Image (tube, grey):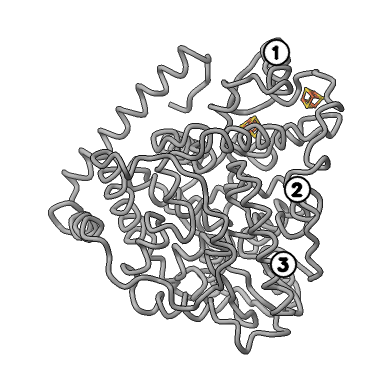
Amino acid sequence: MVNKHFIDVSCCRLCGACLSSCPVLNYSPELARAAKDRLNRGLDIDVLDRCTTCFSCNSYCPNDCHPYELILLRWHERYLRLGLPAIARMVIPGDQSSIWSQLYPLLPSDEKDQIREWRRMEGKHGRDILLTGCFSSFSPFLAANSVLKGLTAYGDERLWCSGGHIYQLGLLDVVEKAGLRIKKVLEELKPRQVVTMMAAEHAMLTRILPEKFGININTDVITLEQWLLQQLQSGNLPLSSPVERRIAIHDNCFSKSEGDSLWRAVREIASACGADLVEMPHNRRDALCCGFGAAAGKFSLLDLIEHGSKRLKEAEQAGADCLVTYCSACYFIFSVVKELYGSRLELYHLLELVALARGDKPLHRTRQRAFQIIAIITANVLRMTFNSAARRRFHIDLSLFDRELSQDDKGTEPARLVRFFNTLYNSAAFCNAVVLGILHFTVRTIIYFRRRLSHDRYGEISVS
Ligand code: SF4
Ligand code: SF4
């Protein structure tokens, strides 16, 4: 479990730099010092409610005291005391209410086949493995891409993104279990090299699991972006169709654990694709979260939409017509928020951008997938509203990790409520300018009043 290397509060000088520089909290230096003091003593609530688990404060600390890990530790203590609210089940792999369990039956057959293939270990030993990451299973079409030729995809959401997204939620005992499981899988696969489709997995395998949990992965691991850059530089990936679009790049939370080399690689790749890059005011180490982390404090879907839409607005105001992300989780969050909020931006994963620059036509099922996920969220929220048993808080069953990973455990029939909303949201009666206009207006109005409230309470500068 959490050991003494996880965080050493005694190195904190209470200078407050971490929380006063935080792009979310908007604390004065005095407030920041007081809040950090309370956090050190386990007494703060405000930071724990409003933190978007973005990783930035680690880089603001002049003493390398890891204030971010302290927040995770406090969340972990809260989790041990209270468990998680039921809504969190949606991002718990293997749970019947999870998006994975409910999405798989809705996927087209080519993507179901892809997931089945990703889960297979036979014939993959000693290869260059593309570790897909649990959130890539929401959009397997991203990896149906000639750009990835030469890599063998392997992945399963029950590897929990090597513990990535639950690390961000502070579920530290679960992270340890997930870490031990991915270690066992990689020892069996014995890959020549692992290429991680999500920066989160690279950070987990190369830094966080060894340094914070003592779990050492004896495999060469590089990010997808490093691999792409190598392919471009060696001439293996000729690009012949410049993508003449103005793009903004969203740097994800875990990219901050990688630092400048990753941020530079992504921008080099985008430039090689012929894109015209614009930067959002919050970029690289100061980047705001996509909305996933914003829901971590209070598990509020409105926090997720509010912060996700803030980021979309920031890209629009920077003059971009496309937002490019290199994280499958950010891709899914932005796709959902875009449909609910009504952003004019097009959303691409970096892999799709490279495919376009090669002259390919990526599948880009972004909109359809977003509405499938919105159908699942609607069904879950309704169920949890009207069924008290479905609303109960819970602790994650760690015995899940003792079960073998079977290949076909994907469900076949969508739940009735999910099927109903999926049919509705994909029908002409819903997908028309009038209904979508009403939806966007309603969501924007709710978000506007939330921001006003937050501005009054915290003086937060909102992106209007
Ligand atoms: S993780 Fe991000 S949002 Fe949370 S306190 Fe640190 S800088 Fe602020
Ligand atoms: S964690 Fe670092 S930046 Fe934050 S108060 Fe302590 S010493 Fe200062």
Label 3: element kind: helix
Query: Please, what is the three-letter code of the amino acid marked with disc 3?
Result: Lys
Percent across and percent down for residue 29 are 71, 13
Type of amino acid at the residue the image marks with label 1: Ala
SS of the residue under disc 1: helix
Observer-nearest of 365 and 304: 304
Image point (73%, 79%), residue name: 191
Give the percent coordinates (x, y) of residue 359.
50, 75
Q: CA distance from mark 2 to mark 1?
A: 29 Å
Q: Amino acid at mark 2?
A: Gly
Residue 208 visible in the displayed image: yes
**Sooner in the amino-acid sequence: mark 1 or mark 3:** 1
Percent x, y of residue 190:
74, 79
The tag earlier along the polypeptide, 2 or 1, is 1
358 relative to 458, above or below = below
User: Which quadrant holds residue 36?
Assistant: top right
Quarter of the image that includes the C terminus: top left
**Quadrant of the rendered image containing residue 305:** top left
Q: Of helix, strand and loop, which one carries label 2?
A: loop
- For disc 1, the marked residue is 34
Residues under labels 1 and 3: Cα distance?
40 Å
Q: Residue at x 31, y 48 (%)?
A: 380
Left or right? Give the position of 9 relative to 121. right
Label 1 with label 3: CB-CB less than 8 Å: no
In this rendering, position of residue 413 left or right of residue 229: left
Q: Residue at x 19, y 57 (%)?
A: 420
Q: Which of labels 3 and 2 is toward the front?
A: 3
Q: Which residue is mark 2?
A: 259
Q: Which residue is mark 3?
A: 183
Mark 1 or mark 3: which is in front?
A: 3
Q: Which is more toward the observer, 38 or 314?
A: 38
Alpha carbon separation for disc pair 3 and 2 = 24 Å
